[in-house]
Amino acid sequence: MNWIWASIAALLFLQGVTWAEEKIENSPGGQEGEKYRYEALPIGGDAVKRESTEITLIDEARGVEYISKTISPEDIEEITIHMDRGGRFISGLRTTSSRQNERLQQERVWIADHKAYVEKGTGEEKKRKEHALPQDMPLAVDGSLLVLLRSFPFNQGKEWTVFMVDFSGYAIQVTVRQAAMEKVVVPAGEFECYRVEVVVDIPIFHPKVTYWLSARKPNFLVKHQGRKGPFTPPYVTSLVSME
């Protein structure tokens, strides 16, 4: 069952993470970008397990570029994802390094010929895996899910089935639905939010993770709650500041 929980952890990329600043400004290349910072702890508040992430979303002429850097007590993870303007995944790269800046792992994901390809490693040690893409089903890879959700038909009682692929090579389907409208209080303030549930389509038990997205555009993440694995505590991620 480990691959199931690894898949769940991958699609939750945000859990156990620290973020919280939303700002639109000119990027070095002259493009508009959003910058975020959040904070997350296991329920119970074990500060030793705190992680931090900085994210930039750059609006390009051809689409959206997602850039994140996550610092945990164990390592540093950097992700770059390219999407079209509707948030649909095109390609991505994840690099994991030690806190001493020693590269530990590199993975790429890209789309070609109606398939998603995952390549792990560098040089002669590269390993490749492929997944046929279901027809009429959007694809998301890790953080691209957050951008894809900005196109969700809120307040219309609809559901999405999304094909998720992670950088480790696993693939699953999830069901996305809006559960409610709620006021959420986080360190950054009080926000009117869509509560969005992402249910992993696994028989018998259906693990669920919850996102609270701001009702106002650009529907940024305000809060997130979910598990990283079957034996880990649930994490709560909250917006702590915004510019």
Image (spheres, helix red, strand yellow):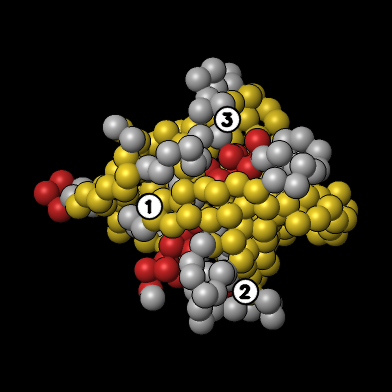
Single out the mark in the foreground, 3 or 1: 3
Residue pictured at 46% horizontal, 33% vertical: 82
Give the mark nearest the N terminus, 2 or 3: 3
Residues tagged 3 and 1 counted as in contact (Cβ below 8 A):
no
- Quarter of the image with the N terminus in it: bottom left
Q: Position of residue 153 (x, y in %)?
A: 71, 39
Q: Nearer the viewer, residue 7 or 60?
A: 7
At numbered mark 3, what does the secondary structure look like: helix, strand or loop? loop
Crowd class of label 2 (few under 14; some 14 to 19; many from 20; radius 10 Å): some
The local secondary structure at tag 2 comes to loop
In the rendered view, would you say 20 is above or below 74? above
The reply to whether the C-beta atoms of the residues labelled 1 and 2 are less than 8 Å apart is no
- Which residue bears the numbered disc 2? 234
Kindly report which numbered mark, 2 or 3, lies closer to the viewer in this rendering.
3
Instruction: Answer with left or right where residue 135 lies relative to residue 132.
Output: right
Depicted 93 relative to depicted 185: above or below: above
The residue at the point 52 percent across, 75 percent down is: 204
Q: Residue at the left extreme? A: 124
Q: Amino acid at mark 1?
A: Phe
- Residue at the spot 32% in from the left edge and 40% down from the top edge: 115
Under circle 1, the secondary element is loop
Q: Which residue is mark 1?
A: 167
Q: Residues within 10 Å of mark 3 (few under 14, many from 20)?
A: few
Front one among 197 and 123: 197
